[in-house]
Image (tube, rainbow, N blue to C red):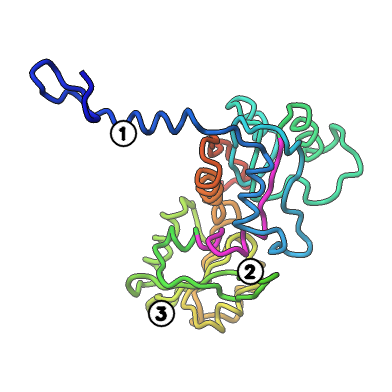
Amino acid sequence: MYFCGFWVDSKGRIIKKFVNYLFFSTKLRNFAPVKIKEVLSALERFAPLPLQESWDNAGLQTGLTETEVSGALLCLDVNERIVDEAIAKGCNLIVSHHPLLFRGLKTISDLTDVQRTTMRAIQQGIAVISMHTNMDNARGGVNWRIAEKLGLSGVEFMSAKQVNGVEAGSGVIGELAEPTAADDFIIAVKKAFGVECAMCNELLRRPIKRVAICGGAGDFLLDEAVKNQADAFITGEMHYHQYFGYEQQIQICVIGHYQSEQYTAEIFEEIIQKECPGVKTVIAETCTNPILYI
């Protein structure tokens, strides 16, 4: 017998609490279909397109926005293998960090990976949305997630600005819970991001407390990190000559472009699950990092 949210037997003993299950399953059944344009709007509310750099091409890449979402595959890069994974997992939407159409296409054929990927996505009815430097520059975006993985507190933009009344910025800076020796710091970073090696300048001979971050190709912010009195600077890639001249001034730690931004898909998932409940989200299993460490 069911009574007041509980199943009870003939002697009045509780068999199973059932009310939470009923409430949850009813909510699932009542979710309205979500269109691709609604997911796009949710992502752009979090990271508005005006936040992207002038050279970028974030936003909708391919697809029909009035189509209902069967599932969203979340990834860093879009290639043919990612499209195949979307098909296999019943997803007609791909949300990536790096744009599929970074540069304009004059031909869509089978000549290049980008052309083949674009053609396959269109043929299979798969929409592609990319949130790139707008997600880098948004509060709570890529760099904030890196800081979270490192357990930093007091995180703020390293170089803040206002774009159409929206707070934005390049890179973030925050503090470790405790001052940490340089070698221990680098080991902790490698562990947090699962990297096989980190490229660093000479080890700092003072404890590291204040850490600056810019995911991806962030070497343009190295001097800004020094200006903000950071003890360490973490980024994804940096030019050779920029390692010179910072000995005992700041600890440089370069962990790889893909590795630094690999958790971006988690941000996409949180946005979609919050703003578009009921949409199936799948973080891609396909590794698109083109660099091998041998």
> Would you call the spot at circle 3 few (<14 residues within 10 Å), some (14-19), or many (20 or more)?
some
Q: In the rendered image, which residue does mark 1 sit on?
A: 20
The one nearer the camera, 83 or 32, is: 32
Q: Earlier in the sequence, mark 2 or mark 3?
A: 2
Q: Quadrant of residue 235?
A: bottom right
Name the amino acid type tagged 3. Arg
Residue lying furthest left in this view? 11
Q: Is residue 142 magenta?
A: yes
> What x and y, as percent, mark residue 229?
50, 83
Q: In the rendered image, which residue does mark 2 sit on?
A: 166
2 or 1: mark nearer the eye? 1
Boundaries of the magenta span? 127-144
> What x and y, as percent, mark residue 249?
51, 82
> What x and y, as percent, mark residue 113?
77, 38
Name the amino acid type tagged 1. Asn
Q: Looking at the figure, which quarter contains the N terminus?
A: top left
In the visual, does 269 lie left or right of 204? right
Disc 2 secondary structure class: strand
